[in-house]
Image (cartoon, grey):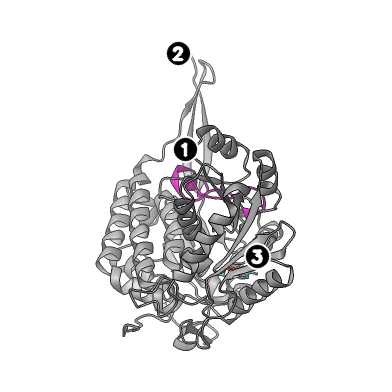
Amino acid sequence: MAKQVQIKYTQLFIDNEFVDAVSGRKFSTVNPSNGKVIAEIAEGDKADVDKAVEAAKRAFNRNSKWRKMNPYIRGQLMHKFADLVTRDLEYIATLETLDNGKTYASAVEDVQASVATLRYYAGWCDKIQGSTIPTGDTSVTFTRKEPVGVVGQIIPWNYPFLMLVWKWGPALATGCTLVLKPAEQTPLSALYAAALAKEAGFPAGVVNIIPGYGPTAGAAIAEHPEINKVAFTGSTEVGHAVMAASAKSNLKRVSLELGGKSPLVIFDDADVKEAAGIAHNAIFGNHGQNCCAGSRTFVHSKIYDEFVKQAKQLALNRKVGDPFDSKTDQGPQIDQEMLDKVIGLINSGKQQGAVVQAGGIRHGDTGYFVQPTVFSNVTDEMKIAKEEIFGPVQAILKFDTMDEVIERANRTNYGLASGVITKNINKALEFAQAVEAGSVWVNCYDAVTPQTPFGGFKQSGIGRELGEEGLNEYLEIKTVSINVTKSN
Ligand code: ADP
């Protein structure tokens, strides 16, 4: 049963205060399990983004409390924030399940991963070092790594709290100030994060949250002349728009984490049952609403039939329903639009001749549930093999040789992630070296940790999040050259 939970914050968060939108407008956030409105949320747009940027600029002023703060203390603030997230873990996970529909157990995992990410970046605050560069005896040259300034952050609805933390971690560790727009489908946990940031003691204006829609609030961030960098996670289509907005406005730095159609390749020496389990989790995790989902399952022809049998059984075993029920594996998709999109792509798979092994239709008639779906006999030119479905749909393709599968795996504009399952180290490494993807998982999938860089080749993105590389997106390098005059 859905837990009863009080929604504490529904307004924009600017300069450490919760305020209404300038326009006074509100929008509904909906529970995807039943389509009912959870709360009315203040709807920010350009006027509110402008106010938030002013606050973020004040907080980034050269003489501000934030700028003068010892980086060690900045790290302590981040740890304090992580303490508060830990204190309220159950509440945040409940908000997340209510607003997003993910199972409560996976919401708890997301919040735990968020705490780990915050603590990882907290540790970096006083370790962001420049270097000294040899330029000869008559000069001394060193570099400083300085915060890029006011950053705009636009995040999606699939991991609302975790994506916020992926964005906040490096921004705060480097000493930036920020304006974040959560997805319109899932504003609740971001507003709660704002309250915790204030409680932790972050100075006013360091973090600002503007819930609202993409073409209004999101575009206002992407176009803003005084935002120095924008970090975006979402669709490739909107990624193009964000980059164009940067080009048209002030050439703000852009980092993009976009879509994927990631290949997971299973060789014939694999333990089929184990491989089917990895492949199942790779696609069905988070209801398929995962940018790095293993959405093209390539299986060697020698084990193909056996693999399909196992994959089918795993999908049939998957329990769909109330995400607050601890027995549930899969809750609803995020909204009607995504439900329609997923069902549309499933229908295209049927029409183009793929064979439905499991599912293939909507689950129930309330909320946005889809039956875990497995397609066999999928070929490369089918829409379900080419387009990002972002739903619980496994497409199983057949291959024979290494060269063939590498070529087919790379025949896409995406390049976010990939996986390979084999006991043969040479095969694993040959694939790892040849695949065009930002992550390669060998005999596992989704092995993402705070210290491992994550991001895409090709149209899956620009830049990297997490790890030390994630910091670079928020830093400017300044080279200081000093002339040394010989004495006497
Ligand atoms: P998804 O398909 O996952 O919903 P989107 O790319 O549509 O991905 O949305 C991701 C985020 O981008 C959301 O916060 C959304 O509001 C925002 N967004 C959508 N359109 C725009 C836009 N034109 N400019 C800036 N942000 C946008």
Mark 2, residue position: 487
Of labels 1 and 3, earlier in sequence is: 1
Mark 1, residue position: 144
Between 332 and 314, the one lying in front of the other is 314
Between circles 2 and 1, the one closer to the viewer is 1
Residue drawn 38% across the image and 68% down it: 107
Between 233 and 479, the one lying in front of the other is 233
Answer with the quarter of the image where residue 240 lies: bottom right
Q: Residues within 10 Å of mark 2 (few under 14, many from 20)?
A: few
Give the total of numbered labels: 3
Q: Is residue 23 magenta?
A: no
Residue drawn 54% across the image and 68% down it: 392
Answer with the quarter of the image where residue 349 lies: bottom right
Q: Which residues are magenta?
A: 453-474
Query: Which three-letter amino acid code belongs to the residue tagged 1?
Result: Arg
Label 1 secondary element: strand
Give residue 238's mark: 3
Give the Cα distance between marks 2 and 1.
27 Å
Between circles 1 and 3, the one closer to the viewer is 3
Of labels 2 and 1, earlier in sequence is: 1
Give the Cα distance between marks 2 and 3.
59 Å
Instruction: State yes or no: Cβ of the residue under disc 3 lies below 8 Å from any atom of ligand 1.
Output: yes
Residue drawn 44% across the image and 52% down it: 170
Q: Position of residue 92 (x, y in %)?
A: 34, 71
Query: Which three-letter amino acid code belongs to the residue tagged 3?
Result: Val
Between circles 2 and 3, the one closer to the viewer is 3
Of labels 2 and 3, earlier in sequence is: 3
